[in-house]
Amino acid sequence: MINYNYEWKTLDEILRNKKTKVCFRGYSETSLDEITDGASNKDYKIAHELWLKLKEAFNKEAEIYDHELYQSKLGSIGPKEKREVLRTMWWDFVEGDKHGDYRRIISIIEMLHDGEELESGIIYFGS
């Protein structure tokens, strides 16, 4: 079994590997295609674009983040270097409802990026 280590960075890499069986964080061997019940390439494109917006906001938020004040528009909780973002809050922040199916797009983003180390800390996804 191969562990997924956040190596699919571009939309092309994601599309090329969506049927590849790997072990995502917290899952046994599976593929994105199985988890998302056959998401379309358009779903992956939207998910990738929303991920880039979320990643940028997450890194920028670190400049002012104070978990004791709980002022995060992404719903971040926890220490700055290991923040969990709350699903409904970050989804609203990136205006996800304007773009497509909530469950499918959330699944793609969370499978590809939960636990990923970004420039300002590790991002985790919470409900």
Image (cartoon, rainbow, N blue to C red):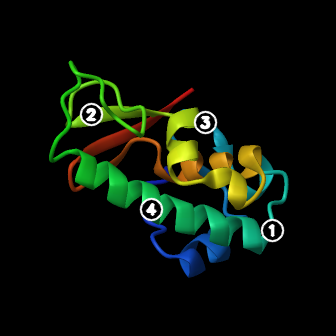
Q: Earlier in the sequence, mark 1 or mark 4?
A: 1
Q: Is residue 81 above or below residue 50?
A: above
**Amino acid type assigned to the residue bearing label 3 in the image:** Tyr
Most extreme residue toward the top is 68
Taking the spot 43% from the left edge, 65% from the top edge, the residue there is 7
Where, quadrant-wise, is the C terminus in this rendering? top right
Q: Earlier in the sequence, mark 2 or mark 4?
A: 4
Q: Nearer the viewer, mark 2 or mark 4?
A: 4
Q: Which mark is residue 27?
A: 3
Question: Residue 80 location, x and y as percent?
Answer: 20, 34
Q: Which mark is residue 53?
A: 4
Question: Residue 111 location, x and y as percent?
Answer: 58, 47
Taking the spot 70% from the left edge, 61% from the top edge, the residue there is 99
Name the residue that disc number 1 marks: 40
Q: Which mark is residue 2?
A: none
Q: How packed is label 1: few (under 14 Cα within 10 Å), some, or many (20 or more)?
A: few
Query: Observer-nearest residue: 94 or 124?
Result: 94
Q: Is residue 108 visible?
A: no
Under circle 2, the secondary element is strand
Left/right placement of residue 93 relative to residue 44 reads left
Q: Earlier in the sequence, mark 2 or mark 3?
A: 3
Disc 2 and disc 4: Cα gap in Å? Answer: 19 Å
Left/right placement of residue 80 relative to residue 40 reads left
Disc 2 and disc 3: Cα gap in Å? Answer: 21 Å
Label pair 1/3, CB-CB below 8 angstroms: no
Name the residue that disc number 2 marks: 82
